[in-house]
Each structure stands twice: as C-alpha cells, then as structure tokens.
Image (cartoon, rainbow, N blue to C red):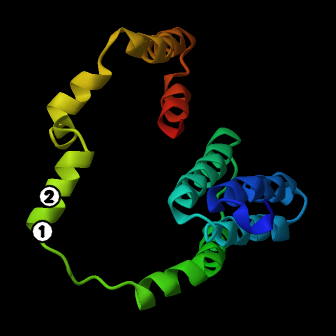
Amino acid sequence: SDLWTIMPRTFYIAFLPLPFLFLYNSQKNIKYLLLAFFTIGLIFNFHPVTGIGGVLLFFGVVIGYLFFHKENINFKILFTGLVLMVLGMFPFVMTYFTKTDTSVQYDLNDYALAFSARIPSFFTDVYQYSLQWVKPKTLFFVLPILGLFILSFYNKKYKKTFWIVFIA
C-alpha cells in the first residue's frame, strides 16, 4: 500500500486539527483567525460530506467562544473569514456546479425499487424511525442532559446551559 490508497475521509481527518490550532493562536494575531477560516474551507475539498460536519464544528467553536467570553463581535472580520472559507471551498464548488449533471437519466421506478431494497421502510416514516431510537439505551443520552438542565436552574445558569446543549 502507498500514498494513493489513503481514503479521502482519512486525509480530511488528518488535517482537521489545523484550523483549530490556528484558531487557538488567533488571540495573538488576527491573521491566524483568517487563516483558520481559509484552512477549514480548503480541507473541506478532501471529503465534502465529512467537511460539512467539520465546518459546523468550527462555527460552533467560534460562536461558542464569542458567546462565553463576551467578546465583541467584529462582523467585518467574521465576514472576511466567511469569504476566505468559501474561497477555500471554491475548487469543490466550481467542480460541482460545472461538472455535475442534474438531469434524470434513469427510470424513477427502478430507483424507488432499489431505494426500498437498500433502505428499510421505516426510514421514510418519521414516526416509525423515531420509535427505533426511543429505547432504554436512549436514557443514557437523555438523562445527563436533563440533569444538566435541572442543575443549571438551581445555579441560574440556564441560558448558558441551553447554548452548550444547542451547540453540542
């Protein structure tokens, strides 16, 4: 095996810490913040499906930091960062819009048949799909969040708790 056998998602995950490292140093110099925005956009090109999650995580960290540290939001810098991020994503965006054909070249009945053979029927029904998740194992995820909300009301920090849960 050699370099060309690396999966794009693995390559993406290997570079994902870079924008966060730049973000960490951005308190010293604003150039690092702008470099972080560009880098998260650039590594998005390696695996766009996973890249969306990384971009959302990045924005969650930036917004969470600004919210919890009561920093003044400089919208000019954030807009510049957003433009640099889109500029970093430009190779994928340009390829997607210029090389992807949106016309349907296949029989929709065959597609529906193949979809139903691969995906379980409860996936298209929201109620049935949610019943698959509401099981005793769900309590291990829900109870700590409820406990966090209950404790936050006693400490009068329910607004910050809401945002922590929302960002998570």
The amino acid pointed to by label 2 is: Ala
Q: Nearer the viewer, residue 42 or 87?
A: 42
Left/right of residue 115 with respect to residue 64 in the rendered view? left
Image point (50%, 80%), residue name: 93
Up the image or down, 96 lies above or below 152; here it is below
Left/right of residue 32 with respect to residue 68 in the rendered view? right
Pointer 1: what residue?
Answer: 108
Image coordinates of residue 139 in percent, x first then y, are: 41, 11
Left/right of residue 68 with respect to residue 156 in the rendered view? right
Image coordinates of residue 149 in percent, x first then y, are: 47, 16
Is there CB contact under 8 Å for labels 2 and 1? yes
Q: Nearer the viewer, residue 109 or 94?
A: 109
Figure quadrant of the N terminus: bottom right
Figure quadrant of the C terminus: top right
Q: Nearer the viewer, residue 94 or 64?
A: 94
Q: Among all residues in the image, which is located at the extreme bottom?
A: 98
Left/right of residue 166 with respect to residue 76 in the rendered view? left
- SS type, badge 1: helix
Q: Among all residues in the image, which is located at the extreme front?
A: 1
How far is the residue under mark 2 from the one under mark 1?
6 Å
Which label number is shown at residue 112?
2
